[in-house]
Image (cartoon, rainbow, N blue to C red):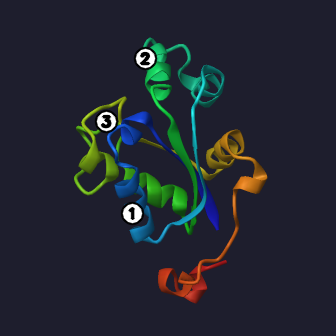
Amino acid sequence: MEKTLVILKPSCVERALIGPVITRIQQRGIIISGMKMMQLDEKILREHYSHLVDKPFFPSLVASMMASPVVCMVLSGVDVVEVFRKMTGVTNGRKAEPGTLRGDFCMSGQANIIHASDSPENAQIEINRFFKPEEVFDYTPSNINFLYSADEIK
């Protein structure tokens, strides 16, 4: 099954939204294959957001991502990158559709509660950045036959 990286940002942690977000993930039928809380530092943020380092907002992005611990998760499922990005909503919470995580839980472009990998290739790079191999579990939940039909599971 495909995997993706998700980070519940400080704006999610500080607003006590960890539970509601995880509930929505599990209600959708997405498998949590790894999860941990960690404090990010500038080194990992410079690597993770290397495409934004030269942007004028980068210092405030780093500060916001270091404001509290974050919750990092590896999610698994069929087409999980695409499915979860749709669940997440557009970057700016004010413009995110109701029913998406950002549309329901945030009003900001930067304090937008969640990071989700944008492609299967980037997901693997990001998972390797935040997780050791032994922290990601490949398992089949007992309810898998209620999540997918047999021909959808590879």
Q: What label does residue 23 carry, if any? A: 1
Q: Of the residues shown, which amino acid type is indicated by label 3?
A: Asn
Q: Nearer the viewer, residue 139 or 39?
A: 39
Looking at the image, tell me whether mark 1 or mark 2 is earlier in sequence order.
1
Q: In 3D space, how far apart are the residues under numbered discs 3 and 1 (Cα atoms)?
A: 22 Å
Q: Of the residues shown, which amino acid type is indicated by label 1?
A: Thr
Q: Is residue 4 above or below residue 107?
A: below
Q: Of the residues shown, which amino acid type is indicated by label 2?
A: Ser
Q: Is residue 62 above or below residue 145?
A: above
Looking at the image, tell me whether mark 3 or mark 2 is earlier in sequence order.
2
- Mark toward the viewer: 3 or 1: 1
Position of 86 with respect to 62 (left or right) is left
- Mark toward the viewer: 1 or 2: 1
- Mark toward the viewer: 3 or 2: 2
Q: What label does residue 92 carry, if any? A: 3
Quarter of the rendering occupied by the N terminus: bottom right
Q: In 3D space, how far apart are the residues under numbered discs 1 and 2 (Cα atoms)?
A: 30 Å
Badge 3 marks a residue whose secondary structure is loop
Disc 3 to disc 2: CB gap under 8 Å:
no
Disc 1 to disc 2: CB gap under 8 Å:
no
Q: In 3D space, how far apart are the residues under numbered discs 3 and 2 (Cα atoms)?
A: 16 Å
Give residue 130's quadrant in the image: top right
Q: How busy is the neighbourhood of tag 2: few (under 14 within 10 Å), some, or many (20 plus)? A: few
Label 2 sits on residue: 60
Residue shown at 69% from the left, 57% from the top: 136
Badge 1 marks a residue whose secondary structure is helix
